[in-house]
Image (cartoon, rainbow, N blue to C red):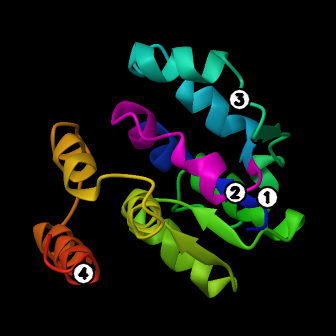
Amino acid sequence: MPVVVADTGPLHYLVLIDTIALLPQLYETVLVPEIVCTELRHPNTPASIRAWLATKPPWLKPQPTPPLTALPFPKLGDGERAAIALAQAAGAALVLMDDRAGVAVAHAQGLQATGTLGVLELGAMADLVDLPLALARLKTTNFRYRPHLLDALLARHQARSGGA
């Protein structure tokens, strides 16, 4: 798959639930605006995430953040705004983002977007992750989700895997 751009959320949660290895298996390169790296390094960010980022995986490519004054969509967070701008500039096929408002803006800008749940589902479809286990782990974090989305995701997974 072509290059994708990631916002903070999917990286944060995939590290927390120990499924970050999905990204290089699903995508060739993951670009991140430097502001996303700054958010992931924040002292309040869990130590496991800061330690993961310090390893600088070769598939993760930090990019300069465009000047925030030049970025549209002031109602979005800086990470979302920068990820959308970087995706447009890099011609990325996909933006990894959990923020619903950010996803709506990305779609309005002609970009495809998916979040943590979409990455987990794609990984499960490729037999790269145990989806029920990953979702159980995700529920132990502060990840915000609509319960019916998880129910639908598990139902699709069970239908694909023959009810298992």
Distance from disc 1 to disc 3, alpha carbons, whole Å, reads 19 Å
Q: Kindly report the distance in space between the C-alpha atoms of the residues bearing marks 1 and 2.
A: 7 Å
Which of the 4 image quadrants contains residue 108? bottom right
Q: Magenta segment: does it hold 54?
A: no
Q: Which of 88 and 58 is in front in this view?
A: 58
Q: What residue type is labelled 1?
A: Leu
Task: For residue 144, say whether it is visible.
Answer: yes
- How crowded pointer 3 is (Cα within 10 Å; few <14, some 14-19, many 20+) is rated as few
Label 4, on which residue?
Answer: 156
Which mark lies nearer to you, 4 or 1?
Answer: 4
Q: What residue type is labelled 3?
A: Pro
Q: Which image quadrant is residue 54 in?
A: top right
Residue on which the image places disc 3: 57
Kindly identify which residue carries mark 1.
Answer: 86
Span shown in magenta: 13-30
The residue singled out by tag 2 in the image is 5
Q: Nearer the viewer, mark 1 or mark 3?
A: 3
| Residue pictured at 51% horizontal, 42% vertical | 11
Tag nearer the camera, 1 or 2 = 2
How far is the residue under mark 2 from the one under mark 4? 26 Å
How many residues crowd around disc 4 within 10 Å: few (fewer than 14), some, or many (20 or more)?
some
What label sits on residue 149 in the rendered view? none
Name the residue type under label 4: Arg
User: Is 53 left or right of 116, judged from the image as shown?
Assistant: right
